[in-house]
Every structure is written in C-alpha cells, then in structure tokens.
C-alpha cells in the first residue's frame, strides 16, 4: 500500500543519514571533551547536585508519558485501547531519535539570525560533553510531551503510519523551531526590539505553557479539523453526542501521574537545585492545578446537577498547563487566580469546540492550546518583580499589574506567533499527508476498532462489544 511504501522510504532515508554520519561519531571519546565529567567536576565542584536535580526532574517528566497514556486510554473505547497506548509509546521512541538527529540542533544549536540553531546534529562533537548530555535529555522529555498531546485529541481515527510521520516531524522541526525562538536565543526572546519593548527582556516562558503545551494543543486542533469527527459523534442535526470512555479510573490515575510529573516539569526548569525558588514554583504549580480542578468541578456541577469526573481531571491539567509559564514569577494568590481562569477556559473552550464540529476526544485543545496561551498572557499580567530571567542574577521580571505594559505586549506577540506557527504547521503537515497517504482509516476499520485493524491485537480479549449496530467479538471474528 502507498502509505506503507512512504514509511519504508522514510525509514531507509533516516538509516542512510545515520550511516553517513557514522565515521564522525566513531572517534575516540577523549577527543570530544569531558568524557567522564572529571574536568567539569574539578572546575565546578557544586555542579553534581544540579546535574542530579536536572536529570531526576527529567525522569519525572519522562514518566508523564505514562500519565498521558492512561488519561487518553481511559477516555477512549475498549476497541482502541492498544492503539492509543501504542501511539503514546511511539511518541517517545520516535521523538528520542528525531530530537537526536535534528531537533536539538535546531532548538539549542548556534543561533542563525534568530530563526534556528545550526550546530549539534546527531550530537556530533558533543556526544561526551556531560553538560550537553544533561540538557539534551531534559529538553527531549519536553519535546516528547509536546508530541503526545495530539494523540488523545485525534484518537480512534488516524492511520498509525500517518501518526508515526507526524511524531517525527513535530519532534524534529515544529517544536524545536518555536522552542529556539523562546529558549534557544531566537528572536522572540532576544531580538533588540523585543528586549527594548519588554524593558530588558523579550518574551519568556519559564517551563513551557507556550513552547510545549500550546504548540501541541494547536497542532491537535489542526489535526482534528483535517480528520473530522468520529463516526457517531454528531446526530443528523449536527448536535454532539457523548461517547463515554471505557475506564474513568485510568483517566484519574493518569491525572495524578501527570500532576506528580509536573513537579519535575516546572521546578526542574531552574536546571539547578541551588535555585531555591524551586519551593515557590512547586507551591504555585500545585495551587493552580487545584484551583482549576475545583473550578471545573463546580462549573459542571452547576450545569449538569452532578460534578463531572472527566472534566475535573481536565481542569487540574488545565491549571497545571496555565501556571507552567508564570510559575517562577508570580505570587501564590496569582497562581490561584490563574488556575480559576483556566478552569473556566477548559470547560467553555471544550464545549465551544464540540458545538462547532471539533471532535477532540480528550479535550486537548482546550487543556493545552487555550490554556497554554492563557499561561503566556498571565505571565505578562502577574509577574511581580521578585525573580529574574530564569535566574536571580538578571533583571527582575514585571508584568502589566506592576507597571510594565511592554512586557505584556511581548507575551501577546509570543502567544500570537505560537498559534500561527503551530496551527499553521499542523494544517500544512496534515494536508500534505491527507493528499499523499490519506490520514484516516476506513469507516469499516473505525467501527471494528484500531486495535484489530492497525495492530492485529486487543487489550481486552475476553470482552464482547456491540457498537453502531454491528455485534462483534473483540477477538476480531463476527458473532
């Protein structure tokens, strides 16, 4: 089939590129710098604790992949369980390789005119530099988080081969480019007009409301629009129908895992255990998640007469997304306000999209896209001047409420660019895939479930399902 040939060509090209690089990668470790960290330790005896802090926080963020997998699987139907789990797994697998080949160089390499990095392909020249290895791993797990956001939004519809290509492209290009603009010395953070506008600093994003979450969220929006809704999601009049997930316990457990991992995501972004602001960051992170969860719970309680478990979970995640950008720069009361607003955004944002034909299975666009944007904007409002630009040694950051409308404008510019880049790239990518490979499984395959049709496996072999009037055994044979 055509899509299978495309995947094979893609894989062969990647292997040839790696082979072409292999002579340079085979040179003795002693030629690359600090192979065992001895010189680094001698020059900086206080760094081991920072290395340990950064790597352990990176391990926590990597574990968030399990949280995403459980949340998305809990919200899907039994017949798509293995497929959703596989997509979350492949995001980390493909993301690791794509970020090694291209992504890290584009994001964190030597800046070229504020647009992209140009050094560090395949980690060439840095493969035994312990400092580079630590930051590479930490940035990788953030990249994988951005990629996996799309999985839940478009679940139960896309071809797996298409998803593999998408995962490679976001990890190698889309995420790293915007990441360079904000974190890698690119134009949003460092262009003279942005620094002048912000009174000493350009656009900021402490741990990734925009760089990670909004990028993933708006690509998810583009993908949902290109794929269309699931069969049975809307009635003949266009009114949305509920399609319940099969395991709400998975969703709640996944939410707890994600919340736990966020204490690596946000405090870990100091990249130093010596930055004792990590205590403030942890408290702000927790309060925003709690405030948003409570808000979503009460909104659904008032609307439906009962508190909704799934929306409460999404509320918690929305608050965590929103606080990710401003977590180091705001007071605890501001964190609560940011969380409350996030709770409103996730509920009404999800309902707005659903009522306008956007079938986002897990609510990823409202959670990550809309609240990622709110996180960037809230930083421009509530930054109170008690902390510097990623470290207390630099100018303190102040927002609109503290007399700095210029920085607020910087954040608005960053939010607008973020949406245009992520949503635009998402539309282009999925349009190309739609025209060349086709991006959606057939109606018959969708009804049977992607576990069987895409993987020839099932998560629950002893279940029998009846959906859309077609009884079938989950083993694949019709009853």
Image (cartoon, rainbow, N blue to C red):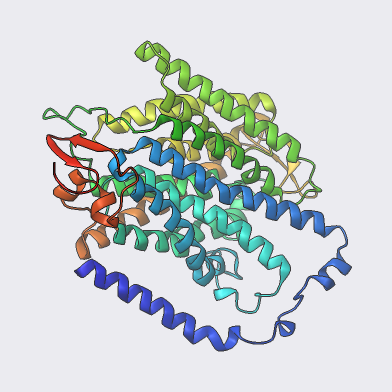
Instruction: Say if 300 sits above or below 247 in the image.
Output: above
| Side of 116 where 281 appears, left or right | right
Quadrant showing the N terminus: bottom left
How many labels sit on residues?
Answer: 0
| Side of 385 where 180 appears, left or right | left
Residue 97 appearing in the image: yes
Quadrant showing the C terminus: top left
The picture places residue 317, in percent across and down from the top left corner, at 51, 34
Say which of 181 and 223 sits in front: 223
The picture places residue 326, in percent across and down from the top left corner, at 62, 38
Instruction: Say if 259 sits above or below 135 in the image.
Output: above
Residue 325 appearing in the image: no
| Side of 85 where 381 appears, left or right | right
The picture places residue 396, in percent across and down from the top left corner, at 74, 42
Residue at 20% from the left image edge and 42% from the top image edge? 473
Residue at 36% from the left image edge and 78% from the top image edge? 12
Say which of 242 and 89 sits in front: 89
Residue at 72% from the left image edge and 66% from the top image edge? 131
| Side of 355 where 247 appears, left or right | right
Residue at 62% from the left image edge and 60% from the top image edge? 137
Q: Residue furthest front?
A: 462
């Amino acid at each position: 089939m055509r899509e299978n040939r495309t995947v094979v060509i893609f894989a062969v090209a990647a292997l040839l590129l790696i082979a072409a690089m292999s002579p340079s990668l085979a040179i003795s470790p002693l030629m690359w710098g600090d192979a065992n960290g001895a010189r680094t330790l001698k020059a900086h005896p206080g760094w081991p604790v920072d290395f340990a802090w950064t790597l352990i926080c990176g391990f926590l963020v990597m574990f968030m992949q399990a949280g995403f997998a459980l949340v998305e699987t809990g919200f899907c139907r039994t017949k798509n369980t293995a497929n959703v789990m596989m997509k979350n797994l492949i995001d980390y697998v493909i993301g690791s390789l794509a970020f090694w080949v291209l992504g890290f160089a584009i994001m964190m390499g030597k800046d070229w005119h504020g647009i992209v990095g140009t050094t560090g392909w395949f980690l060439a020249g840095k493969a035994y530099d312990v400092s580079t290895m630590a930051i590479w791993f930490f940035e990788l797990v953030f990249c994988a988080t951005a990629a996996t956001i799309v999985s839940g939004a478009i679940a139960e519809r896309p071809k797996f081969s298409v998803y593999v290509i998408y995962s490679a492209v976001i990890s190698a290009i889309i995420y790293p480019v915007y990441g360079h603009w904000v974190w890698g010395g690119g134009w949003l953070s460092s262009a003279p007009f942005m620094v002048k506008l912000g009174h000493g600093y350009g656009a900021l994003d402490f741990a990734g409301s925009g760089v990670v979450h909004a990028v993933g969220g708006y690509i998810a929006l583009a993908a949902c629009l290109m794929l269309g809704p699931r069969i049975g999601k809307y009635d003949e009049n266009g009114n949305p129908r509920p399609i319940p997930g099969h395991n709400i316990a998975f969703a709640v457990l996944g939410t707890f895992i994600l919340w736990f991992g966020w204490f690596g995501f946000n405090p870990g972004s100091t990249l130093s255990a010596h930055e004792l602001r990590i205590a403030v960051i942890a408290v702000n992170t927790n309060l925003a998640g709690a405030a948003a969860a409570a808000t979503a719970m009460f909104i659904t309680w008032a609307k439906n007469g009962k508190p909704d478990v799934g929306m409460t979970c999404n509320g918690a995640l929305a608050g965590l997304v929103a606080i990710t950008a401003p977590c180091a720069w705001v007071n605890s009361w501001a964190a609560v306000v940011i969380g409350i607003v996030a709770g409103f955004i996730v509920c009404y944002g999800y309902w707005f999209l659903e009522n306008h034909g956007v079938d986002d299975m897990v609510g990823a666009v409202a959670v990550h896209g809309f609240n990622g944007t709110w996180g960037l904007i809230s930083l421009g409002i509530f930054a109170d001047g008690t902390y510097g630009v990623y470290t207390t040694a630099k100018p303190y950051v102040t927002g609109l409420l503290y007399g700095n409308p210029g920085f607020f404008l910087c954040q608005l510019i960053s939010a607008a660019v973020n949406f245009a880049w992520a949503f635009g790239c998402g539309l282009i990518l999925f349009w190309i895939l739609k025209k060349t490979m086709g991006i959606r499984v057939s109606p018959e395959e969708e009804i049977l479930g992607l576990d069987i049709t895409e993987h020839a496996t099932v998560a629950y072999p002893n279940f029998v399902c009846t959906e859309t009037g077609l009884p079938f055994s989950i083993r694949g044979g019709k009853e």
